[in-house]
Amino acid sequence: MNAARIVVVGWDGATFDIIKPLVAAGRMPVLARFLAEGAHGPLCSTVPPVTPVAWTSFATGASPGRHGIFDALTLDRDTHEVRFVSAAMRRAAPAWAILSGRGRPAGAVNVPVTWPPDPVDGFVIPGMFTPTDATAFVHPPELQAEIEARFGVCRDSPKLDPDPGRYLDNLLAGVDARCELTLWLMARRPLDYFCSVFMESDRVQHFFWAYRDPAHPLHARLGQAIEAVYERLDAALGRILDACPPDTAVALVSDHGAGPLRRAIFLNRWLMDQGLLVLSGDLAALAGRQPSPARRAVAALARAVLPESVLDARRRAKSKAHARINNLFSAIVDWERTACVSEGIAGGIFFNPRVVTDRAALTARLKAGLLAIVDPETGQPPFMAVHAREELYDGPALGTAPDVVTLCGPGYQVLVPHEIALYGQGAPTGLFAPHKWSGRHEQHGIFALRGPGVAAGLALADAAMPDVTPTLLYALGEAVPDTMDGRVLAAAFTPETLAARPPAVAPGAATEAAATATDGEAAASLADELSDLGYM
């Protein structure tokens, strides 16, 4: 009553809000059958519900307080350096490393924050947050040469294109390319655990959500762009399922949901207005000199006609300039007079230990002040919750978390300092500003499981991101390490399976990662990559 192998298909940012209407309309027939034949339900993401945090909780079965990833960026309170996260910062072992250590070959493809790769019996092809100029980033190294000979340069998702129609075509082609690579890897060497993540669902929602509005001038042409990507993902899922032997358990996972984004709030502006953040330099200088419309047009033409090798070389050449971007804001903070600052993509607030002597008092002041803000244009509060880190997290990594974590209300997102330099919109003069995206992350993603011992047609409730890996380990007949925070979703399995094989727990090895980030050049190219994808 257990599966011989597990195949995990990741759809980054997928939401039942899009899926259920498509299934009801008969537009996702593969997923409709998959849901009917197994257990499924909404999957509560991490807090905050952002890609690097959530996928790390998926991989490790651990909460952020244990695995140590709280955002895409982190602020060193001593040096004030803003750094990208990487797998080198992860303090808990991922499923593929655990299973490999137990003698079961395992592989992961395109899972975010998996660079540098774990040396497993199998393979790791890192996903988002892998530096573009890393020459050898796949484990084992010889696999990278095979992949590039067959499929070209590894990318976690298609490049952003300023023309939305072309970008949609890129995303659809990206789904097909990821599916081909996935099938080739599955056939090349069957593994006991295999995970492949598709990023296109997340990208299309960030950039195309506004076109869903019937009043948008491009609605007729692009109003169904998100649905088109989901339909292409459905077709890819069908091909992957056809390649799975009958004794395979297949899981479908997304790291968070998605919804509309209408306004950005510049949290650091509010901190400045309150006297909690003091600058020693000019905020407007962060925006720098923006390219003219003519220069933008020439750049767009170059991207369209120049060979990929030339574009990659150009991106590597400007890496050093990008290395400065994350730290432009930190460099103009007066750290002798600043009590706190917001850094990262999720609106976390870091206290300055040189200035703050009463953490509880500052936390209370931030909670009261932030929750009292009302957007004069909409009449809505931009923040729906403000938490002290101790209210959300527990574990050995707690001390590296932001001191205060904010959660935006529907339609809002925090404007991150480095976005001023990269989005070319100028430094905001007020508290609110437009945002480059029209879609944002929401708290609930999706989870579905089908295979030996799994109950058919069952609706799951209260599933959370750290529960996924313990559940998959149980499906494989493996004990769950006691270092995991997640639990086996027992409701997903038949009573006969649970009676014959109750969930077991085994001692887990503590994994203490060195709390060091990528080196300077790698961080620079990583900034360039995220900018190209529209994440910066």
Image (cartoon, rainbow, N blue to C red):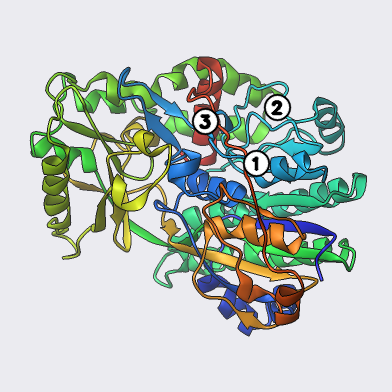
- In three-dimensional space, the C-alpha distance between marks 1 and 2, rounded to whole angstroms, equals 13 Å
Looking at the image, residue 235 sits to the left or right of residue 149; the answer is: left
Query: What residue is shown at x 49% (from left), y 32% (from top)?
Result: 85
Local secondary structure at mark 3: helix
x, y (%) of residue 115? 63, 31
Query: What residue is shown at x 81% (from left), y 61% (from top)?
Result: 240
N-terminal of the two: label 1 or label 2?
2
Query: What residue is shown at x 28% (from left), y 19% (from top)?
Result: 331
Question: Which residue is the site of mark 1?
Answer: 156
x, y (%) of residue 32? 70, 78
Local secondary structure at mark 2: loop
Looking at the picture, tell me which residue is in the foreground, 517 or 428: 517
N-terminal of the two: label 3 or label 1?
3
Q: Taking the image as drawn, is residue 429 in sight?
A: no
Position of the C terminus, as image quadrant, is top left
The residue carrying pointer 1 sits among few (fewer than 14), some (14 to 19) or many (20 or more) residues within 10 Å by Cα, namely many
x, y (%) of residue 71? 43, 40
Instruction: Identify the disc placed on residue 89.
Output: 3
Looking at the image, residue 287 sits to the left or right of residue 99; the answer is: left
